[in-house]
Amino acid sequence: MSCTVCFVTDLPVEDARALVRAIVELAGMADRALPRRSSPLAARLQKHLGVIGEAIASTSLSLPIIERVNVQLALDAYEADVERWEMIGLIADLGNYGGVSLPAMVSGSWHGPGGISTAVRRG
């Protein structure tokens, strides 16, 4: 098939499958050839938690929106009682990026939208 602009839907099924296989193979080659990026967020979380990569236990908890206030109150109370507090700021629309979880951040498998910002309070 010859065209200036082709869409996968314009290709015969076998050609579309071959194209997808080639793209997957190319992505695999790039993954093997390119150096691994180290995540500053992953390094900080690993240092804080004392675990490396996938060694962190994974648990999940969904809180109703109304409980977020209680979580913030608990964090405020904890912050007031500790000598050193470090807050890592992530963007507000973090939920728009797939695969967001603490274990994914610690393992470095989640790269997200970019950098992090921090605020450190020393007692």
Image: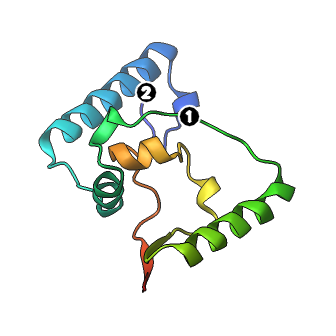
Q: Quadrant of the C terminus?
A: bottom left
The residue drawn where x is 56% and y is 29% is 10
Q: Residue furthest right?
A: 66
Q: As rendered, which of 88 and 121 lies closer to the eye?
A: 121
The residue drawn where x is 54% and y is 47% is 100
Give SS at disc 1. Answer: loop
Colour setting: rainbow
Kindly indicate the quadrant of the structure image that contains residue 92.
bottom right
The residue drawn where x is 77% and y is 62% is 70
Q: Quadrant of the N terminus?
A: top left
Instruction: Give the left or right position of residue 119, taking residue 40 as reference.
Output: right
Q: Amino acid at mark 2?
A: Met
Depth check, mark 2 against mark 1: the one in front is 1
Specify few, some or many for label 2: CA neighbours under 10 Å numbering under 14, 14-19, or 20 or more. few
| Alpha-carbon span between mark 2 and mark 1 | 50 Å
Instruction: Give the left or right position of residue 100, taking residue 17 as reference.
Output: right
The numbered dot on residue 1 is 2
Residue 88 spot, x, y in % from top left: 47, 70
The numbered dot on residue 59 is 1
Residue 43 spot, x, y in % from top left: 27, 57
Q: Is residue 117 above or below residue 5?
A: below
Residue 35 spot, x, y in % from top left: 14, 49
Q: Earlier in the sequence, mark 2 or mark 1?
A: 2
Q: Is residue 49 above or below residue 82?
A: above
Q: Amino acid at mark 1?
A: Thr
Give SS at disc 2. Answer: loop
Q: As rendered, which of 116 and 76 lies closer to the eye?
A: 76
